[in-house]
């Protein structure tokens, strides 16, 4: 069990006891949004517009997968015994602002950092017809297994779609023995309700169009190499006619990745059913005014019945926003993740 099975078992026991004594399953959040940023859309959009300086990734690595595809990894290493693996959101990459900000924060706190690009993300098309999707925990598992050697403790931190993948992996069995924590930020743990919110709310039109624009462009590029996908797009005016996440998942995501339809994909890829099986300290940090989340992504009853799964739901924060300006442009969620990991004592 890891490098030292006795030590590891004792450590996890201590962590579990710590959770019982000090951490409430539903965490009262300390986040306070500045009055002018109380709106969920303001908190969501402003962090993308404000300039921040980040340290560069030290090393790039290509991980070859058994199915003939690959994943590109970005590393920050300093010989630490603990590693954090960062998983980005829909149509993101290791260069996303929220990924690089978290990488700087945790690297300075004594963690080696690995951020991975999903298949077809990071500016490089993948080799196979399959791409990434919201439940692709198999790829996260490949990254973890590849990176685990040499680390006593591994923490997982995922954003939005990456948060769903992170918690799904943590609830699957078995997890890598070095995993010590799983943290999800602004995560749609119930994909069906989040797709409905994104598609139906007129105020989310900006996000919907942005996602669909790049997703459809990637699909058209891939269709040039795969006749099966090209034939699928030939009818009903092609992929350009797709106007909603439901349509995209029904016509592209589900059939390409082996799901019966969009509903089947959302049900099987959502992390919500896996949350009761999580065996490591975990935190779901979702703002109540997140414009991309519905009520189902705030599983209060589950948190109340678990010693290890914790839900923190501040009233404000938007989607991967959480700006409070108490530490300049560093968002509060970066400090919150650091404190959660510090409290585990790993």
Image (cartoon, grey):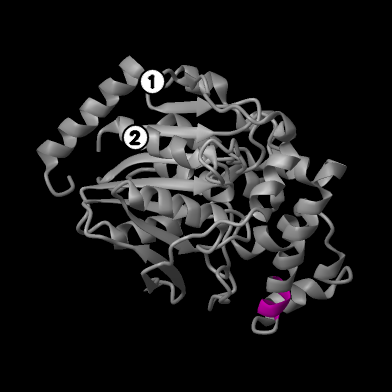
Magenta includes 269? no
In the figure, is residue 121 to the left or right of 54? right
x, y (%) of residue 40? Answer: 72, 36
The image quadrant of residue 344 is top left
Camera-nearest label, 1 or 2? 1
- Residue 141, placed above or below residue 287: below
Tell me the CA gap for discs 1 and 2.
Answer: 13 Å
x, y (%) of residue 63? Answer: 38, 71
In the figure, is residue 290 to the left or right of 109? right
- Residue 287, placed above or below residue 165: above
Task: Name the residue carrying label 1.
Answer: 23
Picture quarter with the C terminus: top left
Assign a secondary structure to mark 1. Answer: loop
Q: Which mark is residue 280?
A: 2
Res 212 visible: yes
x, y (%) of residue 8? Answer: 17, 38
Span colored in magenta:
219-223
Magenta includes 220? yes
């Amino acid at each position: 069990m890891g490098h030292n099975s006795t030590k590891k078992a004792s450590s996890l026991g201590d962590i579990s006891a710590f959770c019982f004594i000090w951490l409430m399953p539903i965490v009262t959040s300390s986040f306070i949004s500045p009055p002018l940023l109380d709106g969920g859309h303001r908190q969501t959009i402003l962090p993308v517009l404000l300039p921040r300086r980040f340290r560069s990734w030290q090393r790039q690595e290509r991980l070859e997968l058994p199915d003939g595809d690959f994943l590109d990894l970005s590393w920050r290493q300093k010989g630490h015994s603990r590693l954090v693996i960062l998983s980005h959101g829909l149509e993101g990459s290791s260069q996303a602002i929220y990924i690089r900000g978290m990488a700087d924060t945790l690297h300075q706190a004594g963690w080696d950092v690995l951020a991975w690009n999903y298949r077809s993300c990071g500016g490089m098309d993948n080799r196979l017809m399959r791409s990434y999707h919201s439940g692709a925990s198999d790829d996260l598992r490949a990254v973890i297994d590849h990176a685990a050697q040499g680390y006593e403790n591994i923490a997982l931190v995922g954003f939005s779609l990456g948060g769903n993948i992170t918690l799904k992996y943590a609830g699957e069995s078995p997890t890598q023995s070095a995993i010590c924590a799983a943290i999800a930020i602004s995560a749609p743990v119930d994909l069906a309700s989040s797709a409905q919110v994104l598609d139906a709310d007129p105020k989310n039109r900006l996000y919907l169009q942005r996602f669909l624009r790049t997703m459809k462009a990637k699909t058209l590029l891939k269709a040039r190499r795969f006749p099966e996908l090209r034939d699928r797009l030939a009818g009903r005016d092609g992929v350009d006619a797709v106007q909603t996440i439901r349509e995209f998942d029904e016509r592209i995501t589900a059939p390409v990745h082996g799901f019966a339809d969009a509903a089947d994909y959302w049900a099987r890829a959502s992390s919500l059913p896996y949350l009761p099986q999580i065996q490591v300290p975990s935190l779901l940090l979702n703002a109540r005014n997140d414009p991309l989340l519905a009520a189902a992504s705030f599983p209060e009853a589950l948190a109340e019945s678990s010693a290890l799964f914790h839900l923190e739901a501040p009233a404000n924060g938007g989607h991967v926003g959480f700006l409070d300006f108490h530490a300049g442009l560093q968002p509060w969620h970066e400090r919150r993740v650091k404190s959660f990991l510090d409290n585990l004592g790993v």
